[in-house]
Image (cartoon, rainbow, N blue to C red):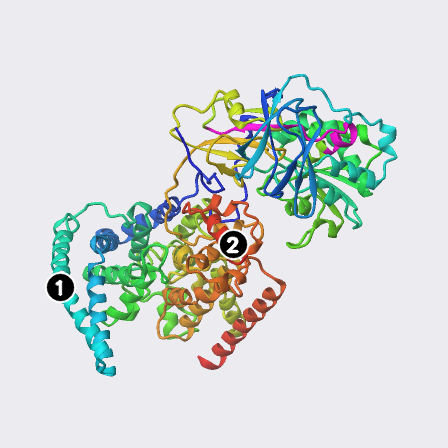
Amino acid sequence: MEIVTKNAPHLRRPNANVTRMMRDVSIALLPLVLFAIYQHGVGGLLILLLSVLAMVATEYVYYQISDCIERLNEAKTDTVQQIRDLRAERKNLKREWKNEKTDQSREAYETFLKTYEEKMPRLKETLKQEKKEASSKDNLSFRLNNKSFTIYNFSVVTSGIIYGLTLPDTIPLSMVVIAAVVGLLLSKLIFGGMGQNIFNPAAFARVFVVLAFGAALSYDAFVDGAAGATALSALSENPLADNVTEHYGYWAMFSGIGLPGSLGETSALLILVGGIYLALRKSFDIFVPITYLATVFVLSYSVMLTQGLGFWYPAVHMLSGGLFFGAIYMATDPITIPVTRPGRIYFAFGLGVITFVIRLFGNLPEGVVFAILIMNMFVPAIDYPKWAKSRFSLRAILIFAIVVVAAILITNLGVHYGL
Amino acid sequence: MITRSRKVSDYKQLTKELPTLRYVDPEYVYINLNTARCKEYTLNAKKGDRVKLGEIIGERKGPFFTQPIYSTVSGHIEDVVEKIDSTGITVECVRIKNDFKDTYHEDITDRPDSVIHNMSKEEIVEIVKEKGIVGLGGSGFPSYVKLDTDKDIHTVVINAVECEPYLSSDYRLIKDQPEDIFRGLTYIMQASGAKRGVIAVKKTKTELIEVLEREIARFNEWNIQIAKLDDYYPQGWENATFEQAIGVKVPVGTLPMDKGILGYNVSTCASIYEAVKHNLPITKRHLTVNGDAVKFPQNIRVRVGTSVRELIKLSDGYSEEADKIEVIIGGPMMGVSVENDDVVVTPTTTSVLVFHSVDHKEEPCVRCGSCVFSCPVDIQPVSIMNAVKRDDTVSLKELEANKCIECGLCAYVCTSKIHVTDYVRKGKQQIG
């Protein structure tokens, strides 16, 4: 028996771990996955499977390569540095001799040249040997386990499911795979893997689909849904048209049954069920979706009031186009949102405003994923040590209230004069 | 998980209802001569000298105070040896061989209540100073300094919260000697002129509240209340206790005395009673031996100066299946992990905990924000950790890393099992 010393605290919360958190998100997504398969059949299942597999495989291959490089680097010795030093020294002495043109400097250079010529071949020989050893050892061989791979904590699986659920069912499978690979690589892996990414991988991959393959399919059928115009694409063409609810009743929009749209975004009901599960398990920060949804509701309600529209207007905005899905599953990814409670509320408010503005004034009928990526960029600014505070101060509340009022005013003025 | 989580499982049920074992007669006691606060000392006794219980054998010199060193047994002085004390540093200790007679020094006489009743503030302060009473909650700060304040004191708060898990020494003290605590409180109130006395205790400890409420009836001429606090960690942190017990917020950087509050730990209060009433220095204290790697957890009333090794032997030793253990002096959240069990019990040693050493697997931080939400002083441990990693002193100052009280909650709640507290501690040191 041996007594070891550690720093306080010596206790840890037993049930706190990342794996549980990520696994909870996957569990909360299960009803949506089943619903998507029910709605879209084998096609939907294929898209989901491919998006998860593509992301997992990308991460696996990436870490195989990076681990391999790391092992090679570890095997390297300082021989390379020694060679570099020798060369630099020779260059230095030569320059000195040419500049000063004294016998002394010439002598120094020549004596050094002798040792240089003596040492150099030997060093080169050892370097060759070492390179051979490093690559011949099992450093380059395949190892099933690689240490940075994070499949065990479900983070990449969760990203894959979320990404798959945002896709429309008519998308060609090759696009699913390409966007998944590129999205995960560019948004997460090159930043240093889990915990280091700035952008939400699922949102990034989804936006990549829109930007890279948008022309291959028409916008209507693509960004916001499947075959047939959705409520939002109808709104996009004519922002204040009041006939959108004629096609779909409130219940259809809430439950998602028979509604065209992305695989998992149509059923607000099932998304809410997952959200409640996550809230009960405390696996996400509930303030983010609440603020996000409330912002969109308040903005659309104010437009309803100033334009004399019916209650269908905020209802359509709330229930369609992946707002619930984005608010509950994508905007709550803790890695890409601020760490303080006020910061998270500012972040979610920004999401709401940008989503609504893109829907009203933008070229695209849908703005949730774009809003998430745009606000992801502001996270370091919100978390900046100088002004990030853990609690609301009176001043912060006042400024925030002014910003909220200004956002409502500007939106309504824009609607009045711009549309 | 991603929420404000300040609940810490307290594990006190292991020991809190066990009777207090008395282990007051070790063969040797080791009286520490210097402490973390007092680096220098003089020892007036030499080898072979016979000392009595409560006799002054030397003096510690602190930065602005001196403290007499008392013998806690009667017997013969032997040599000076090196031991570890409760703060984990190596100190010099004088070894005294116990003659098991407990012959009291001539000065140790009881004061009649009538005398105590007429004592002035200066007299009580003098006794507390002379008997070397220090904060027994773990701070070791001399108690007379607080008592001697010239500020206007309206409330005395006795801190019996004991929010650290596993510890039940204060719990047992209140159950065993409730009267001492009340008497001590009345002495403090008499000295400070406070109108109100408050005993702060967690509301989950119903047995204690029962005991205290029964006792309060006997002191109804004093305005003493019991404040029942919520079961949070770190509710026993002075400022948190004051905030909930009497509703006064003490900002970081100011002293409670400025707000008219005096705060004492419950064991300090009991030892003030012994000093004033019996003229005794701190010779015994309640101590908990607990943890999952000790065979028989229990509460012990020990002589100050006992070796912890003997106490562990008394608890049937370490459990055999443990191959790596941690020995912690103090609570599991803020206690000090010592490198061997050759530790001496000082007045501030509240407990000895022995744990199986678990190596937590650290995962990358996912910025879940639990540490930010849970922090009792509202700083952002995760941002401080990142600032420490990139060596960013400017950010550390802006993030107010120096406000940290090192309660350990951020590491406790961390979902990635990162030792956040360690990083914050480093950050605190970096900006001084």
Name the mark on residue B429: 2
Determine whether, in the image, residue B390 is placed left or right of residue A187: right
Mark 1 vs mark 2: in front: 1
Say if residue B25 shows up in the picture: yes
Taking the image as drawn, is residue A64 in sight? no
Residue A135 is left or right of residue A366, and the answer is left
Q: Nearer the viewer, residue A262 or B411?
A: B411
From what the image shows, is residue B126 above or below residue A74? above
Which quadrant holds residue A281?
top left
Name the secondary structure under disc 2. helix
Query: Residue B412 in the image: x percent, y percent?
Result: 48, 43
With B293 as the anchor, is A161 left or right in this view? left
User: Residue A12: x, y in percent?
Assistant: 46, 40
Which quarter of the figure is the N terminus of chain A placed in?
top left
Where are the magenta residues, as a range? Answer: B272-292
Which residue is drawn at the image coordinates 80% and 25% (left, top)?
A: B110
Image position of B426 with respect to A410: above or below:
above
The lab-note entry on whether marks 1 and 2 share a chain reads: no
In the image, residue B281 lies in the stretch drawn in magenta = yes
Whole-percent x, y for residue A156 in the image: 30, 52
- Residue position marked by numbered label 1 in the rendering: A118
Disc 1 residue type? Glu
Frontmost residue, A137 versus A90: A90
Query: Which element carries disc 1, helix, strand or loop?
Result: helix
Q: Amino acid at mark 2?
A: Gln
Chain at numbered mark 2: B
The 10 Å Cα crowd at callout 1, few under 14, some 14 to 19, many 20 or more, is: few
Q: Quadrant of the C terminus of chain A?
A: bottom left
Q: How many marks?
A: 2
Circle 1 chain = A
In which quadrant of the rendered view does residue A189 lie?
A: bottom left
Q: Who's the residue at 24% across and 83% down the image?
A: A99
